[in-house]
Amino acid sequence: MIPGTILRRAVLAAGLCAPVAAHAQNRRKPPGFYEDGRTKERPVQFASRGVSLSGTLLLPLISELQYVPGIVLVAGSGPTDRDGNNALVLERIDLLKEVAELLARHGIASLRYDKRGIGQSTLRPRNSLAAEEAFFAWDNFVADVEAAHTELLRHNEIKPYATALLGHSEGGLLALAAARSLGKKVHALVLAATPGRKLDEIVRAQVERNAPAMRGPVDSTIAAILAKGHVPAGLPREFDLLFPPYAGPFLQKLLSFDPAAVLAQIPTACMLLQGGADRQVVPMGDVQPLIDALRTRGAPGEAIVLPQVSHNLKLVATPGDPGLAGPLAPAAADALVKWLVPALGA
């Protein structure tokens, strides 16, 4: 090829590139665009043990320029959706949504999802009791947390070496069980309002406090579930919320799950976040076993109990206030950010 032809082609190539460069300059973001807590949201859908789970990936906008840490948020008991709202509670709680937005503003992505049987995830089967029992098995819920963590890692913006699980209430128990299975794939663990005693002990204590006349029937029901893995037939209707007919296999493992013993085995950095006004997981009796387990480990750990903060990490205005609605308590938000940001290198 003659030198003139080479020069002409170089000039043409430069001319073709000029509009692209000009367009890129026009699309430059204003100063501070990525530093002011902006976020972006992405719907996700992933499979786990024969069901489809729907969720939301919330990313800090800085993820367009660099990798960011990520955390899976695990909802508590009952028909609780990805945002932390329970169909049986009239008030909007939005706990997990508020946590996700808080963390995204501080550089941490999160994946939260509708549990199996809830929201846009696969709904429960209705054809037989056996099918419902299999659908709601404890091991399936633990596998769902693991699948959510796998889905989190599938997104290119996430640092694979800086991921965490955060479980609220019963979700903390599921996060503990999943963290034990995931091992070194998880780099931090947050247990929010998570019981430290076996749940059968906590349920018996709650019944003793609130409905002592029911203690005998509750004790016999728990004993039957632990022995056979099925909810006994013919229970009073008022037992349905506590012992749903289809929940026998799930409850058998849940009631006997020892969170403190499991935490003691996990070498993952862990924070316990507990509301001092929690009326479901009562400090310090229900929490102390987890604090004791933190002390036996060789891994970093911190326990924080926040005065006037509810089970849902909201401020409690009066002794009778359940602390459901409203924003995340400032002290809870501050504790999460101060611990998770350095723990994950955000």
Image (cartoon, rainbow, N blue to C red):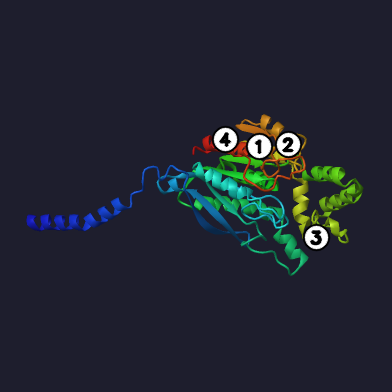
Residue beneath disc 2: 287
Label 2's element? loop
Residue beneath disc 3: 245
Name which of mark 3 and mark 1 comes first in the sequence.
Answer: 3
Q: Position of residue 125 (x, y in %)?
A: 70, 66
Report the label total: 4
Name which of mark 2 and mark 4 comes first in the sequence.
Answer: 2
Q: Please identify the quadrant where the N terminus is shown.
A: bottom left
Residue beneath disc 1: 272
Q: What amino acid is found at the position of numbered circle 3 in the picture?
A: Pro
| Residue depicted at x 61% and y 38% | 330
| Residue depicted at x 67% and y 41% | 315
Q: Position of residue 211 (x, y in %)?
A: 87, 47
Name which of mark 3 and mark 2 comes first in the sequence.
Answer: 3
Residue beneath disc 4: 339
Contact, mark 2 vs mark 1 (Cβ under 8 Å):
yes
> Is residue 268 something one can see in this rendering?
no
Quadrant housing residue 182: top right
Name which of mark 4 and mark 1 comes first in the sequence.
Answer: 1
Label 3's element? helix
Q: CA distance from mark 2 to mark 4?
A: 19 Å
